[in-house]
Amino acid sequence: MSTLYIIATPIGNLADITFRAVETLKKCDIIACEDTRTSSVLLNHFQIEKPTFSFHQHNEHKKVEHLLNLLDGGQNVGIISDAGTPGISDPGFLAVRAAHQNGHTVIPVPGPDAATTAVVASGLPCDRFVFEGFLPPKKGRETRIRQIADSELTSVVYESPHKILRFLEKLHQFCGDDRWVCIARELTKKFEEIDRAKLSDILERWKPRGTIKGEIVVVIAGKNYDE
């Protein structure tokens, strides 16, 4: 049987890629990419010349069969996302499940991901935490935010820059002034920012901003945490 490699790639700084990830990409027969254009920057940088095909949230149901055909045909396939670890708020779950179900070997090649990077940088309790990923855009969104507010565990949320203020305001509605929060923006990149404070102070600093850009991770302390 063939092997499906789940390969973590840098979340921003290309220097964060592991030696093993580069070696594995070079020995794959073909690479499934969330976006082939984005991945080409990484692959060209490390002089990795392998055929690629797109495998993203809008086509992964269709492309799983193609991926299985490649594995069944004796080819070793690597799967990468635009940044971080495939399957963590990115495509990958269906491919990995199908590979297992069809008797192929699955090998993870670990590396960077935004969630754990933000948690360890937050200074908030991380012995146990809940990863929420991206919240629903509409239906169920407020319910999830209420659940985060009521949780005694640290929560980790991915949020888009154009929604961050609305998210913080809604969180403030349910959590109040004194909940500890850390916003990690553009992790590992040139304009990396880690802003940690009580929610009222975070809102005071972020509301006056103009256009907010970049990838954002929000780490929210559990409701009984204080310092």
Image: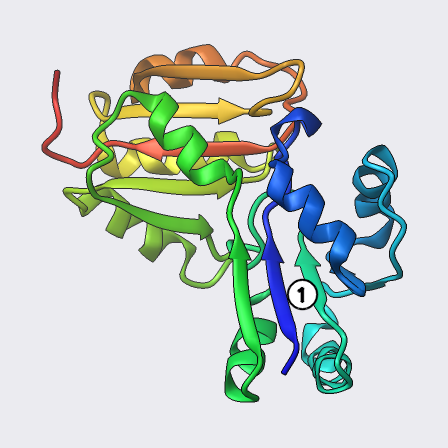
In this orientation, which residue lies closer to the viewer: 21 or 191? 21
Residue 11: which quarter of the image? top right
* Residue drawn at the location 63% of the way across and 23% of the way down: 212
Answer few, some or many: residues within 10 Å of disc 1's Cα (few below 14, many 20 plus, some between 14 and 19): few
* Residue drawn at the location 53% of the way across and 41% of the way down: 111
Residue 173: which quarter of the image? top left
Residue 140 visible? The answer is yes
Name the spot of residue 25 as percent of width and height, x first.
73, 51
The colour scheme of the drawn protein is rainbow
- Classify 145 as above or below 1: above
Task: Work out which quarter of the rendered image holds the N terminus and state it.
Answer: bottom right
In this orientation, which residue lies closer to the viewer: 78 or 86? 78
Amino acid type at image mark 1: Gln
Name the spot of residue 211 as percent of width and height, x first.
67, 21
Name the spot of residue 108 as percent of width and height, x first.
52, 58
Residue 105: which quarter of the image? bottom right
- Classify 28 as above or below 152: below
Residue 137 visible? The answer is no
Label 1: state its secondary structure: loop
- Which residue does the numbered mark 1 point to in the structure image? 57
* Residue drawn at the location 24% of the way across and 42% of the way down: 149
Image-based side of 152 in relation to 11, left or right: left
* Residue drawn at the location 41% of the way across and 12% of the way down: 204
In this orientation, which residue lies closer to the viewer: 193 or 127? 127
